[in-house]
Image (tube, helix red, strand yellow):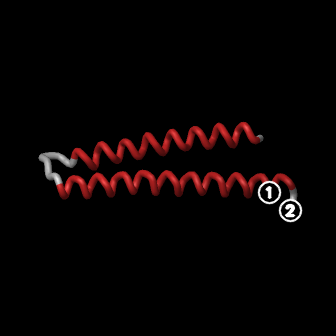
Amino acid sequence: MSDDGKKGLKNWAVFSGIAIQMGVTIGLAAFIGVKLDENYPNKYPIYTIILSLFGVFISLYALIKQLQKLNKDE
């Protein structure tokens, strides 16, 4: 396999891992929010909303850090 092929495969693996990590982080945060809303009911599902947004921000932060590291390695 050529160097370009190996580099493309590495990038594919890195980006796939990032996508899975983001999905798990956001999903876990939303799940915890739903459970909190079940245990502490409010008029609105505030825990789900807050924790889902928190999960999105944490995922974006991790994405930016990983992209900076990937860019530095190249």
Q: Is residue 60 above or below residue 12?
A: above
Secondary structure state at the residue bearing disc 1? helix
Count all numbered tags in the image, as a single digit: 2
What percent of the width, then of the height, locates residue 65? 59, 39
Residue type beneath disc 2: Met
Between discs 2 and 1, the one toward the N terminus:
2
* Residue labelled with disc 1: 6
Q: Residue at 67% across / 40% down in the picture?
A: 69
Dot 2, crowdedness within 10 Å: few (<14), some or many (≥20)?
few
* 41 relative position to 63: left or right: left
| Left or right: 22, with 71 as reference point | left
> Label 2 vs label 1: CA separation?
7 Å
Label drawn at residue 1: 2
Quadrant housing the C terminus: top right
48 and 8: which is toward the camera: 48
Q: Nearer the viewer, residue 51 or 3?
A: 51
Q: Quadrant of the N terminus?
A: bottom right
Whether residues under marks 2 and 1 lie with C-beta atoms below 8 angstroms apart, the answer is yes
The reply, left or right, for residue 63 in relation to residue 73 is left
